[in-house]
Image (tube, rainbow, N blue to C red):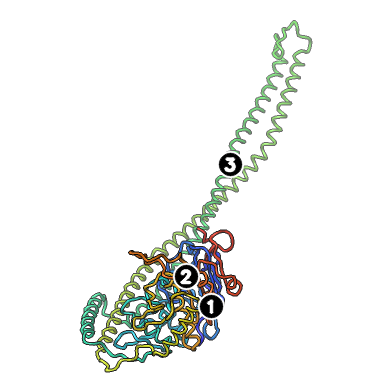
Amino acid sequence: MTGLQLVHLTYAGSGRPLAQILFGPELTVIYGASDTGKSFIVESIEYMLGGADLTMVPEAHGYSQIILGLLLPDGSPLTLVRRPETNSIHLHSADLRDLVTQTPQATVTAVHNARSKNSLSLRLMRALGLEQVLIRKNEAGGTRQLTLTDLVHLSLVTESRMIASRSPVLRTGAPTTRTAETSVMRFLLTGESDPSLETGPNAGQRRVHRGKIQLLDRLVLDLSAKLATEQDVRTLRGRHDRIRMSIEENSRSLQEADDDHRRAVQDRMISARELAVVNERLDEVSDLLGRFRLLEAQYRSDLDRLAMVNEAGSILGYFRVGTCVFCGAEPEHQHPGHNQEETTQLHAAVHAEAAKTTALLSDLLPTISDLTDEQVMLSQRRRNVQEVLQLRDSVIADAEARLVPTRAALDELLDERSKVERELELHERIEELEDRRSQLDGESATSTTRPAQYIPGRILAAFETILQQTLDTWRVPAVDRAEYDQYNVEVRAGGRSRAGRGKGVRSVLHSAFTTALARYCIDQDLHHLGFVVLDSPVVTYRDPVKASADPDPDVPDVLINSTVVERFYKDMLTFPGQAIIVENGDPPVQVLSEATTYTFTADTDGRPGFFPQFLR
């Protein structure tokens, strides 16, 4: 059976360079320095496949979309787009590898729950042909649908889970989920869905159910008391629709009034700047006119004084006897016609000065005339701009008068909508509690038979053979007789449980278990996601130390040497599905030439990390 194929993981954001990894169809190896985002890639894949939480690294700041490209079993592309810290995933039936702006074909919830009717799990399980598969959820034989999360943890192993002492089969380790987790393992190895059989609780569970029913009854009464109206859900939904339409209409009116107000304010600012320019020029012209008119008056006064001097000189020269008023000569020193000659010279000088002043006045008068015309024009322009400003103020006042009541009406509608939505939410919670109460009421019958819950021996032996072959191929020492203990839900090798081994061996056993399970399912044409993602599957430690009185649990009991690493990678080149390996150490040269590889250097040479700015 064909599973999924991972195509790429991309982080995209407006104004941000893409952070992207393209996965090969077979083996992809991402290796290099620590703290460069390798494990973050694995965690991001898990998050995109229905994970609830993802701790964002500082380098991811500003990236608004996480994009995961897939190929479905029929070969068609599917792109998942999820924003960080949200529970919605947009689905696009296309291969998209950049910032996505298209309208999605569908929007689903990322994290599946029992009430999910449109989740990513349901979509992908339907594509894999697993939507009808049931697994046991309790010892009484109750069943639930198989979900995507049930399968992901058996294909994708993060670094923390790789070295954890918890069994690879157990996703949470909680007692309440143990039955479901072991049932998933049974389904993968046998391909058989558990029968839809509700056997009901035992006597102790029925007492618990009665307590739950009483608690639910009290909760329903408390929620009913919080209802503000007696309107039923149908009436409230109709009311909610009418309020929504009114909000949309008021929003449009508010937007129009806001646009008018904004345009009027912008126009007024332009007119105000124009008025400032006009006033500034008018002040300059008025100041110049004042100065030039004073100069004109000075010129005219000078001409009058010159005319008076000319006339007085003539009279003095012709009629006065005695000392010369022009040169101061006494009468005895004056020659005949002396007064007339001096008068003529005075007249000539006065005439020349008057001509010069007249010329200056002639040049000044056109300038005064031009400035006067400009002053009149500017005054008229100022009055026009002031009238426009008054008009703009009127438009602004009108827009503000429309904005106030529209905003008030919209606020009232939003408040009313919130009240109706609270009522609907209370009704929804009451309905959920009542449904749960009905289920508890019906869970009382006890079946005399129980469905099969264990994996048949021949199937388990076939899987254990592949597990042992995997460890032998990798040449891991002291792990013979590898087996899956389905009764204790533990992996054993070398006569010891995986939980009792050091970190290095725990990692190798977890990796071997995950790849062996995938190989078995693919070889037997059974259901599997079709890929494995392993973070730090082979870890090299120092030589084992001798046993001491106070042994260090983190000290390995078997040396994981370079031979194991080399054989591991060589074996993964023959893996029948898609494999993505994340490690610190360099893979062998053969892997570099045959697999899709990425090297994170943590420096300026090569690719520093998953994000373009991953250097810290």
Q: CA distance from mark 3 to mark 2?
A: 92 Å
Report x, y in % for residue 169. 39, 79
Answer yes or no: do the residues labelled 1 and 3 have beta carbons within 8 Å? no
Report x, y in % for residue 72. 52, 83
Q: CA distance from mark 1 to mark 3?
A: 91 Å
Q: Which residue is mark 2?
A: 560
**Label 1 sits on what residue type?**
Asp
Question: Is residue 131 visible from the viewing direction of this image?
Answer: no
**Closer mark to the observer between disc 1 and disc 3:** 1
**Closer mark to the observer between disc 1 and disc 2:** 2
Label 3 neighbour load within 10 Å: few <14, some 14-19, many 20+: few
Report x, y in % for residue 133. 41, 88
Q: Which residue is mark 1?
A: 571
Is 405 drawn above or below residue 343 in the view shown? below
**Label 2 sits on what residue type?**
Ile
Q: Residue furthest right?
A: 336
- Residue at (50, 67) in percent of width and height: 38
Is 376 drawn above or below residue 127 in the view shown? above
Question: Is residue 481 visible from the viewing direction of this image?
Answer: yes
Q: Which label's residue is closer to the chain start, 1 or 3?
A: 3
Secondary-structure class at tag 2? loop
Q: Which label's residue is closer to the chain start, 3 or 2?
A: 3
Q: Mark on residue 284?
A: 3
Secondary-structure class at tag 1? helix
How many numbered circles are shown?
A: 3
Q: CA distance from mark 1 to mark 2?
A: 16 Å
Label 2 neighbour load within 10 Å: few <14, some 14-19, many 20+: many
